[in-house]
Image (cartoon, coloured by chain):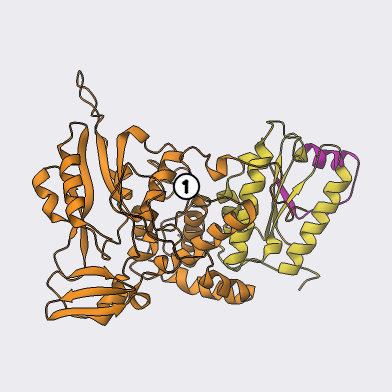
Amino acid sequence: MVDLEKLKNVAKDTVSREDVKYLIGWRQGTYGFRVSPLFMTEPEDADKLIFSPLCVNNLATYLTLAEKLPVPRGAEPDTRKVALMVKGCDSRAVVQQLIEKGIERESVLVIGCPCQGVLDLEKVEEKFPGIHSPVDVQWGDDKFIINLPDGPQEVPREELLAKKCLNCRYPNPVMSDVMLWEEVEAWGNGEYADVKELEEKDSQARWSFWQDKFESCIRCYACRNACPMCYCEDCVLDRLNPQWIYRSNNISENTVFHLARAFHLVGRCIECGECERVCPMGLPLMTLNRKLVKEVRDKYDFEPGLDPESKPFQSSYRPDDQEDFIL
Amino acid sequence: MSEQYDPNIVAFLCNWCSYAGADLAGTSRTHYPANINIIRVMCSGRVNPLFIINALQQGADGVLVSGCHPGDCHYMEGNFYARRRFGLMKELLEYVGVDPKRFNMSWVSASEGSKWKDVVEDVVEKAKEAGPFEQFRRNKINW
């Protein structure tokens, strides 16, 4: 179970360490069910830290998002670690970044928080609308305890659980330096109902489904920016020569953008669901990603973000890879 | 429609096997459909998945990627990476509703001029069945 006292003590000790730059954790947001990231540099800030079913954000994004300023002449580069609080899915993002050598093992200190599944913010805001003061939410046995301003409310777990958590197979961090409390039992079986449903439709129906979705895309690139795996310094979407994908917002360019984004995540997507969560137009981006996750798992027997020593999917091969599609 | 319709197919051939195979088909005066536009690349592993999407976007009705047989790659392992990549590319295209007949991959070695002919006939036949590609074709902009 969640032990906030232990979390705060560990955070204090971590931040006081000489070799730690800052700690990235969650804090209560300014209104309602919102939660913000907390970049903690002082031990006094430990009281602001929370870990609750509201901590949906994947903080692993901030490891590669931090600006790397040039080191002044004669100065030593800052080699201090960044401490990071992770749920199970977030830890896979960290491991995948390690596999790809996007970050170094020495530069990160992982604080593992076994997680019993987070809330779907849209569902909870729909159920309890018009709440402006910050709300605290706790895990109970198969339920969420929501401490509303007019008294606590209990809601069954299945009702408000985020979509990515419904079928979670890795609720415990797969890698950590400090594990805060005892591990929980995984409940997922790795079957994707949404993908299966779409696969059973015919080609025309699938295209009209995706056409409808892609047409509503506004190309804000929030999915790219929130994704912990999208950290190329020179992104293909920003590149002008060659310009693979035009900036115009039409079905052609939008489709190509989404295909390219999904394909860049082949064998890398760790199913944290951030792209879908941040999408302002509500596109089912995970339905696209999960299809590829499923193919990679079923046909190539590969799962990303589990073993820091393994090789990336697309830069490795097996001589007996399937080739039934080849003429 | 299907009698007059001439599909436009882009083929990415590796320099060492498939391109030489197509060359052999040509020098041995083999007849095969002229719908295929060949782009020579150094290795099938060099083909970026965006090439495929971009070809479809810019007017191709079908795409073919062809390289050396597994184990025969001039660069030892390029075609193994390509096989992994394009197997999933095909799945992805099929999943969003693009006809799987439009994207094909084959292994043609430098001595397989007659196989090249069969592959091209097969690919053109499939593209004719699939019809003109319109799903995410880029519209011409008239400035």
Residue B142 shows in the view: no
Query: Most extreme residue toward the top, as rendered?
Result: A74
Chain in yellow colour: B
Q: Magenta span has B24?
A: yes
| Residue at image coords 75%, 39% | B68
The quadrant the N terminus of chain B occupies is bottom right
Please indicate whether residue A4 sits to the left or right of residue B127 in the image: left
Figure check: A38 above or below B100: above
Figure check: A132 above or below A222: below
In front of the other: A303 or B7: A303
| Residue at image coords 33%, 63% | A278
Residue A33 shows in the view: yes
Which residues lie in the magenta part?
B20-38
Q: Magenta span has B51?
A: no
Please indicate whether residue A299 sits to the left or right of residue B31 in the image: left
Question: Whole-percent x and y of residue B15?
Answer: 72, 35
Disc 1: host chain: A
In front of the other: B61 or A218: A218
| Residue at image coords 46%, 68% | A214
Figure check: A71 above or below A95: above
Please indicate whether residue A116 sits to the left or right of residue B77 in the image: left
Residue type at tag 1: Leu
Question: Whole-percent x and y of residue A194?
Answer: 51, 72
The quarter of the displayed image where residue B58 is located: bottom right
Which residue is labeled 1 in the image?
A306
Q: Colour of chain A?
A: orange
